[in-house]
Image (cartoon, grey):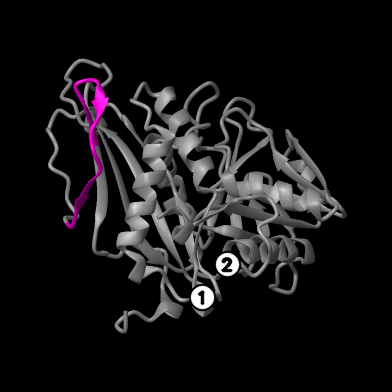
Amino acid sequence: METVDWSKLSFTYMKTDYNVRCYWRNGQWGELEVSSSEYIPIHMAATCLHYGQDAFEGLKAFRGKDGRIRIFRLDENAKRMQSSADCILMQRVPEELFKAAVLKAVKMNERFVPPYESGASLYIRPLLIGTGARIGVNPADEYLFVVFVMPVGPYFKNGFKPSNVVIMRQFDRAAPLGTGHVKVGGNYAASLRSGQLAHDQGYAAVLYLDAKEKKYLDECGPANFFLIKGNKYVTPASGSILPSITNKSIQQIAADLGLEVDRRRITVEEMAGFDEAGECGTAAVISPVGRIDDPETGKQYVFSKDGEAGPVCRKLYDTLRGIQYGDLPDKFGWITYLDEAE
């Protein structure tokens, strides 16, 4: 890939050679198909277009110093897509089919996995959509599962530098007892307007509050949120927060490093007593938060005064990245090696 400047990749779409597809029709999944087309032929009455029957995942593959390609927490993404499918009455993708499709997509686009020293990775996007035609509000009778990939750089322009976020009480990301706990398209559509307003005002993301009381911290933009106080890692607990695989991994790393991990409801005012803050997710990995503005109350919560990430955020980030790239041992069994899975 002589034409790609790996060090300057951003988090944007890039065409690669192939994607992998599988259809559910007549009550069963078909065989994996390979396509070089970026387009999907779809019925105009497909349920994904009208009634939001779509779910997706995001995971990454990394090329290590040893040249081996590592896929991070493949099994967890397979399970989470099943939860999303169950929530909006789509056909489940069997775990083995999910894994086979991801491995095939990565292998067929192996030349797009960035080199070790670039700091970039191969982003993997599994997508499940309802393709059956429905005009009444009903689940589809046909589904399409697609996996496509692309090399990406950091999600946030600053990379591993603190960014500022803003609280916007006039917007909700997801409703209690709704779909916030699964990875479906409607949750992201609901965040577009507030996210654009935040960007227009110079912020990286919106820190959402719970939709019911506007009192407790929820998600931060497209990512989970966490706070650090001394030797404690604290992350919000809510039924409308997506169970981030990255956050789950960081919690395990934090505990292994001797930190106390606490998942609970956190009020806005409590943030004044914390030392560090951050967002975390597959795309962002860990993005430190420098300052949180609350325009409605006029308060600011400052976590970085020198423009640098705090020591705990840095340690968690370095440990997670070390495991993903193979610089640290995979003591938790999170890695799938492409060469062993072939």
Q: Which residue is mark 1?
A: 116
For the point 41% across and 38% down, the residue is: 96
Image quadrant where residue 212 sits = top right
Image quadrant where residue 297 sits = top right
Quick one: label 1, few (<14), some, or many (20+) residues within 10 Å? some
Residue 275 as seen in the image, left or right of residue 178:
right
Residue 314 position, x and y percent, is 72, 66
For the point 78% across and 61% down, the residue is: 312
Residue 35 belongs to magenta span? yes
Look at the numbered disc 2 and give the secondary structure of its residue: helix
Q: Nearer the viewer, residue 284 or 113?
A: 113
Image quadrant where residue 237 sits = top right
Q: Which mark is residue 325?
A: 2
Residue 318 position, x and y percent, is 68, 67
Q: Amino acid at mark 2?
A: Tyr
For the point 24% across and 20% down, the residue is: 27
Gap in angstroms between the C-alphas marked 1 and 2 = 7 Å
Quick one: label 2, few (<14), some, or many (20+) residues within 10 Å? many
For the point 65% across and 66% down, the residue is: 322
Magenta-highlighted residues: 23-36
Q: Amino acid at mark 1?
A: Tyr
Cβ–Cβ under 8 Å for marks 1 and 2 = yes
Q: Residue furthest bottom?
A: 2
Residue 263 belongs to magenta span? no
Is residue 86 positioned above or below 60 on the image?
A: above
